Image (cartoon, rainbow, N blue to C red):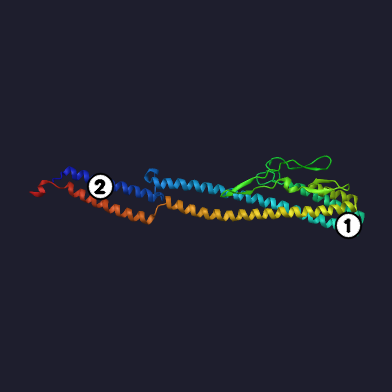
């Protein structure tokens, strides 16, 4: 079979063009550090990269939600713990007022102190988060939850809705504590035997009134209700602690997942430099060989065989 000089030129040109394309692609990969400089260069790597980037983006949003939830829970716990400390102090004052060792003037001082705690507790119940939204208003987070009317009664203006955040695998975690849950809903038995429902501010407000009047019977009732209120707030603090622990656990799990996803993304898109450099050296040697062969072929004439 005879092979024409034109066939030699065409074949060698094709080989050199192929080698030059492979070298150019490897050089571009080395320059960017990516397997696929253009999406069309490696469709599998590009598809895997896009899929993993989407997963990582969702994971980052999830972690951000967990952090936001944790920050909110910390503020809630701080507020409720402060209220509980004030109730402890109110209990101490109630015991002192009932002891009979203090004068009426001393008890009036206690009433002034207790009234200050009542105002502080209202302020804490109207706490806002880092976005300026009320913590204890339910889903009506732009509405001040606790407002005192002209008669001195504190009313709840929010709603009872408590938001649940899906944190992992369909598991939902309570995001907020409504003011209704915070204030509680306690039974009060009146002297005539009837019962009524009261909340935290009713308890403290009536306690202040009892101190101001130095009424032993009302102080005795107030002491019982303060004990109930203290237990209620303690339960709230425990619940917040449990929720914070759950969030912390899921943050750790999320951090581990992030590392795995980042490693998978790196495997999908990042170039193996040592392998690429070895391949580049091999392709450059192949190109040099093709160029050398081409140079020799172009110099062939019939005079070489005469």
Mark 1: give few (<14), some (14-19) or many (20+) Cα within 10 Å.
some
Q: Position of residue 126 (x, y in %)?
A: 73, 45
What percent of the width, then of the height, locates residue 264? 46, 52
Identify the element where label 1 is drawn. Answer: helix
- Residue found at x 80% / y 51%: 117
Mark 1 against mark 2, which lies toward the viewer?
A: 1
**Left-right relation of 113 to 133:** right
**Kind of element beneath mark 2:** helix
Kindly indicate the quadrant of the structure image that contains residue 94. Answer: bottom right
User: Vertically, is 209 above or below 274?
Assistant: above
Front residue of 111/239: it is 239
Which residue was labeled with disc 2?
Answer: 15
Numbered badge on residue 259 = none
Q: Residues within 10 Å of mark 2 (few under 14, many from 20)?
A: some
* Left or right for 81, reference 98: left
Depth check: 233 or 193 in front? 193
Q: Earlier in the sequence, mark 1 or mark 2?
A: 2
Residue 178 horizontal/vertical position (percent): 70, 46
Q: Which residue is drawn at 86% across and 58% down?
A: 96
Mark linked to residue 98 = 1
Most distant residue in the front direction: 193
Q: Do the residues labelled 1 and 2 touch (CB within 8 Å)?
A: no
Q: Distance between the residues labelled 1 and 2?
A: 104 Å
């Amino acid at each position: 079979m005879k092979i024409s000089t034109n066939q030699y030129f065409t074949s060698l040109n094709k080989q050199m063009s192929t080698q030059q394309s492979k070298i150019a692609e490897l050089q571009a990969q080395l320059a960017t550090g990516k397997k696929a400089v253009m999406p069309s260069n490696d469709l599998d790597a590009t598809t895997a990269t896009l899929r993993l980037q989407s997963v990582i983006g969702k994971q980052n949003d999830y972690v951000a939600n967990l952090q936001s939830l944790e920050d909110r829970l910390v503020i809630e716990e701080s507020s409720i713990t402060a209220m509980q400390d004030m109730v402890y102090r109110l209990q101490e004052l109630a015991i002192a007022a009932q002891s009979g060792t203090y004068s009426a003037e001393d008890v009036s001082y206690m009433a002034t102190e207790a009234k200050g705690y009542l105002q502080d507790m209202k302020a804490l119940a109207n706490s806002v988060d880092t976005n300026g939204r009320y913590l204890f208003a339910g889903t009506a987070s732009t509405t001040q939850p606790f407002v005192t009317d002209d008669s001195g009664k504190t009313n709840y203006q929010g709603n009872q809705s408590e938001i649940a955040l899906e944190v992992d695998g369909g598991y939902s975690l309570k995001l907020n504590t409504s003011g209704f849950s915070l204030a509680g809903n306690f039974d009060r038995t009146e002297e005539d035997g009837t019962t009524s429902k009261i909340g935290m501010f009713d308890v403290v407000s009536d306690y202040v009134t009892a101190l101001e009047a130095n009424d032993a019977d009302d102080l005795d009732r107030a002491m019982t209700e303060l004990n109930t209120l203290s237990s209620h707030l303690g339960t709230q603090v425990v619940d917040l602690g449990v929720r914070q622990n759950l969030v912390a656990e899921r943050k750790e799990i999320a951090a581990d997942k992030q590392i795995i996803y980042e490693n998978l993304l790196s495997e999908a898109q990042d170039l193996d430099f040592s392998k690429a450099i070895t391949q580049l050296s091999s392709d450059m040697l192949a190109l040099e060989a093709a160029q050398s062969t081409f140079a020799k072929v172009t110099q062939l004439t019939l005079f070489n065989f005469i």
